[in-house]
Amino acid sequence: MDFEILERLTVALGVGLLVGIERGWRERDAGAGKRTAGIRTFTLSGLLGGIFGAIAKSLDDVVGAGIVIAVGVFAYTAVFATFRFREVVDEDSYGVTTVVAAIATFALGVYALVGDHMLAAAMGVVVTGVLAVREPLHGWLTKINWLELRAGLVLVTMTVLALPLIPNESYGPFGGVNPREIWLLAVVLAAVSFAGYVAVRMLGSTRGLLVASAAGGLVSSTAVTADLARRAGKARGNNDLLAAGVTLASAISYLRALVVVAALNVAVGVHAAAPISAAILVAAAIVVFYARRGIQSKSGADFHLRNPFSLTETVGLALLLGIVLFATEAIAEFLGPRGALAAAVIAGTATVDAAAFSMARLARGVIAPEIAALGVLLAIGANNALKFVIGVARGGGTFALPLVLGLVLPVIVGLAIAGTMVMMADG
């Protein structure tokens, strides 16, 4: 007995069973003989595809094997589609998903025998997942507009089509700038921001200010701060709850910076983990404190965030990343680590992501990882200082104290830990 063939047939059977469970559950209210396929039919479909794949695999002639598979797919599709046609006529519907799912099940059964059976199993899970999220997907489509859909499509296009065409080499002095590396990071950051924007759109204002603030932190914590401060200045909400929203959005931005730097340089991520995590914990405690004080407020999360993704803005972000990287590397080359830290502060006032990117790059040989981690914290501090100024300017003096606790205290704790780590490393 060929146990490899048996294992592959088992995978083909399992793929059919998995899809069949989802299809059978969805059609569970249909009476006997009132549906084209359920658990048994889909399970046998996967196994049948595996049998055709086994027959094709046993042939030495590649052309003959291809003919066997083609005949099997054609015959299976014709029979299944015929019965499904009778069902949709009886139901007066136009659904074709079941037919496509059946063809995919049969094809994956074939591939489990002639190709990578583990990949076939993984794709079976994907097919089942896509079938299972029909209602959420349809609901999501009703909540987005054309501009948002187009933005998402442009994002995917720029990733799939543009990325392979961008040079993957470093150009220029001071270590050079790698266009593909910069573009990839810009696209990833744009994708994260777009995901946060979509979360805000899907959740809406009914889920509360804190939920929307957390999602807004992925888009722009500065924008969240400006809008909530505006509401505080116009007495449109409870200052405690608004301060909790600002603090939470900022904490999410700290986490985003940590993820960025850790993805680019593990060593810097390790050194930055403790101070940034401490800052996040302090911010979380402040959020809880202010949220409890303002929980009785009826303030909603009705601030409006614009769609954060566009081709122009992504190109601009890539250029900004490149400029910041080149500038910090040049300053570090001439002035050493102190110059790199000063550059991180300057860059942080514009965007923490660019500073995190440059610090992660510099730590590959120009500065020590602990210095780079300190630079990330300084960039966060500079960015929070800018948000504090914006918040007080728009929210008024009564909003200053909550912002001090929410924006300044977490950074002080993080900087204290990062500075201690640097001194311990020097000692």
Image (cartoon, rainbow, N blue to C red):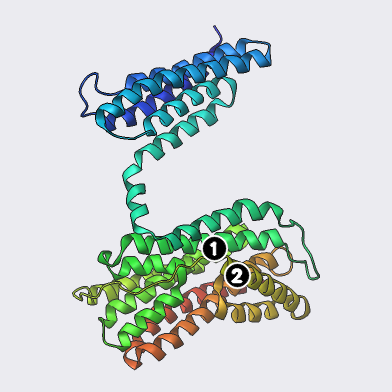
Q: Where is residue 6 shown, x and y percent of the image?
A: 51, 14
Residue at screen point 38% across, 83% down: 403
User: Is 333 on the left or on the right of 308, as rendered?
Assistant: right
**Which quadrant is the N terminus positioned in?**
top right
Q: Secondary structure under badge 2?
A: helix
Q: Label 2 amino acid?
A: Leu
Mark 2 or mark 1: whose residue is earlier in sequence: 1
Q: Residues within 10 Å of mark 2 (few under 14, many from 20)?
A: many
Q: Quadrant of the C terminus?
A: bottom right
345 left or right, relative to 26: right
Q: Nearer the viewer, residue 283 or 133?
A: 133
> Which is nearer the eye, 266 or 418?
266
The disc labelled 1 sits on which kind of residue?
Answer: Leu
The residue that appears at 35% across and 38% down in the rendered structure is 132
Question: What kind of element bears circle 1?
Answer: helix
The location of residue 9, given as percent across then percent down, is 49, 17
Q: Which residue is mark 1?
A: 189
Q: Position of residue 340 (x, y in %)?
A: 68, 77
Q: Is residue 204 left or right of residue 32?
A: right
Q: Which residue is label 2 attached to?
A: 317
Q: Residue at x 38, y 59 (%)?
A: 144
Q: Are marks 2 and 1 in contact (CB under 8 Å)?
A: yes
Q: CA distance from mark 2 to mark 1?
A: 9 Å
Instruction: Count residues near mark 1 (Cα–Cα under 10 Å), then give few for <14, some for 14-19, many for 20+.
Output: many
Say which of 41 and 417 sits in front: 41
Looking at the image, is 328 positioned above or below residue 277?
A: below
Tell me: 276 left or right of 116: left
- Any part of residue 252 in sight: no
Is the residue 220 above or below the residue 12 in the image?
Answer: below
